[in-house]
Amino acid sequence: MTKVWYPVIDYMVCTECGTCVTKCPYGVYDIKKAPSPVVKNPEACIEHCHGCGNRCPVGAITYVGEDTEWTPPNINQTKEAKKESCCSCDDSSSSCCCR
C-alpha cells in the first residue's frame, strides 16, 4: 500500500456507472457516495493495480504515480483511430466492429 499510487477520476468523462466503486476490494472508494466514484482512502490502493481503470467502460480513471505506460483501455476514440486499431473491415459492413 502506498501514498504515491491511487486512482484519479476524470469527472468530465465519468458516467458514474459505479463499476470502480463496487469492484474495488481494497476500500479505496467511498461506498456512501456510490455510484459516484470518490476516492476516500487513497492509501489503501495497491501500487500498480489497474483493476478499476481496466474495468472503467469510458476510460475515466488514471493513476497518480503511473510509470508503466499503462493507458485506460476504454478511452473514447475517433471512428478513424478505432478502425485503424481494430480491423480492416468495409465501412459499409453492418458487422463492422468500429461502429
Image (cartoon, rainbow, N blue to C red):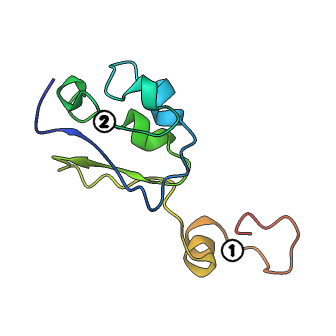
Q: Residues within 10 Å of mark 2 (few under 14, many from 20)?
A: many
The x and y percentages for residue 12 are 44, 62
Disc on res. 34: none
The x and y percentages for residue 65 are 15, 46
Residue depicted at x 46% and y 54%: 59
Of badges 2 and 1, the one in the foreground is 2
Looking at the rendered image, the quarter that the N terminus falls into is top left
Label 2 with label 1: CB-CB less than 8 Å? no
Above-or-below relation of 14 to 78: above
Asked which secondary structure carries label 2, the reply is: loop
Residue under pointer 1: 88
Asked which secondary structure carries label 1, the reply is: loop
Looking at the rendered image, the quarter that the C terminus falls into is bottom right
Left or right: 93 in relation to 44: right
Q: Nearer the viewer, residue 6 or 12?
A: 12
Disc on res. 39: 2
Q: Nearer the viewer, residue 88 or 50?
A: 50
Residue depicted at x 60% and y 81%: 80
Residues at marks 2 and 1, CA–CA distance in whole angstroms = 40 Å
